[in-house]
Amino acid sequence: MDIILLGPPGAGKGTQAQRLVERKGMRQLSTGDMLRAAVKAGTPVGLKAKAVMDRGELVSDEIVSALIGEELDAMAAGQGAIFDGYPRTANQAASLDAILEKRGRVLAHVIELEVNEDALVARICGRYTCANCGKGYHDTFEQPAVAGKCDKCGAHEFKRRPDDNEETVRTRMAEYRAKTAPILPIYEARGIVSRVDGMADIDDVTASIEATING
Ligand code: AP5
Ligand code: MG
Ligand code: ZN
């Protein structure tokens, strides 16, 4: 069973995807994480994507859909995928349909995290991740149990994203409103959209998502 987590920057897509990976053995497919890995490795895709991401604009549909296809091909057929940050345009939504059909996979749920945009800048500007395992944290909302030490892997180094500044966040939100929110009706017409209150506590959001998935 595959699902899409949809919501603006800072809505909690990555946070919730990581939890579903741990609890349900699903796999997180984050195009943002894939692109950041490509930038870090200096691949041709990374070289193209870096400046676009730093501005907060969207990378081309062809690039991200190719990344998703490659990741799905590396997965066991029975393992569920969580699409985090993909699809983001009508074109990508159409590509995803074709990608899933070709592999005999079924999109079961599109979960929209409903959030108050004003709160998102604070969330994003306080966010950091473990440099070793990628576990996400927040200066105020999700701190490690022992300060300076990753709960998951024990590493002591953390990093922040270059696009997590207020100006870029505003552009990312505008992109979401203009290009991504308009794809929801495609899935509404199929009756697979569920809305979850993304302003609730992180644990409560997880519980709501699990309730949706478990039907
Ligand atoms: P991407 O990496 O996908 O970034 P995004 O969509 O802007 O979303 P974020 O990762 O910022 O937010 P999130 O929803 O994952 O929130 P998180 O869980 O971390 O994309 C980055 C860039 O890559 C794009 O701008 C674009 O250039 C490019 N790109 C990626 N995919 C693309 C595509 N398909 N097409 C084209 N271009 C693409 O939570 C945020 C913080 O809040 C965390 O610190 C967390 O601890 C905290 N938090 C989470 N939930 C709660 C809660 N309920 N209460 C309190 N705090 C919370
Ligand atoms: Mg994310
Ligand atoms: Zn770690």
Image (cartoon, grey):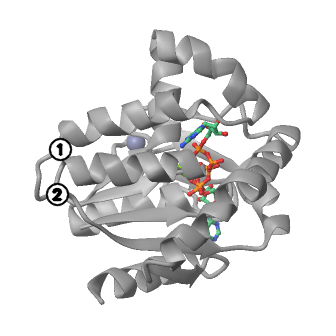
Quarter of the image with the C terminus in it: bottom left
Check the image and report above or below for 6 versus 162. Answer: below
Q: Mark 2 points at which residue?
A: 79
Q: Is residue 27 visible?
A: yes
Quarter of the image with the N terminus in it: bottom left
- Give the SS element for disc 2: loop
Check the image and report above or below for 137 versus 45. Answer: below
Q: Position of residue 180 (x, y in %)?
A: 65, 56
Q: What residue type is labelled 2?
A: Gln
At label 2, counting other C-alpha atoms closer than 10 Å, the crowd grade (few under 14, some 14-19, many 20 or more) is some
The answer to the question of whether label 2 and label 1 lie on touching residues, with beta carbons closer than 8 A, is: yes
At label 1, counting other C-alpha atoms closer than 10 Å, the crowd grade (few under 14, some 14-19, many 20 or more) is few
Q: What residue type is labelled 1?
A: Met
Q: Nearer the viewer, residue 119 or 67?
A: 67
Position of residue 98 in the picture relative to residue 45 (left or right): left
Q: Is mark 1 within 8 Å of ligand 1?
A: no
Q: Position of residue 57 (x, y in %)?
A: 73, 35
Position of residue 178 in the picture relative to residue 7 (left or right): right
Which residue is painted at 72% across and 58% down in the image?
A: 123
- Give the SS element for disc 1: loop
Which residue is painted at 37% across and 47% down in the image?
A: 29
Position of residue 197 in the picture relative to residue 70 (left or right): right
Which residue is painted at 11% across and 52% down in the image?
A: 77
Q: Where is residue 162 in the image (x, y as percent from the top left)?
A: 70, 30
Q: Name the residue under label 1.
A: 75
Identify the disc placed on residue 114. Answer: none
Distance (Cα) linking label 2 and label 1 = 7 Å
Q: Position of residue 21 (x, y in %)?
A: 30, 59
Check the image and report above or below for 43 versus 162. Answer: above
Which residue is painted at 49% across and 17% down in the image?
A: 45
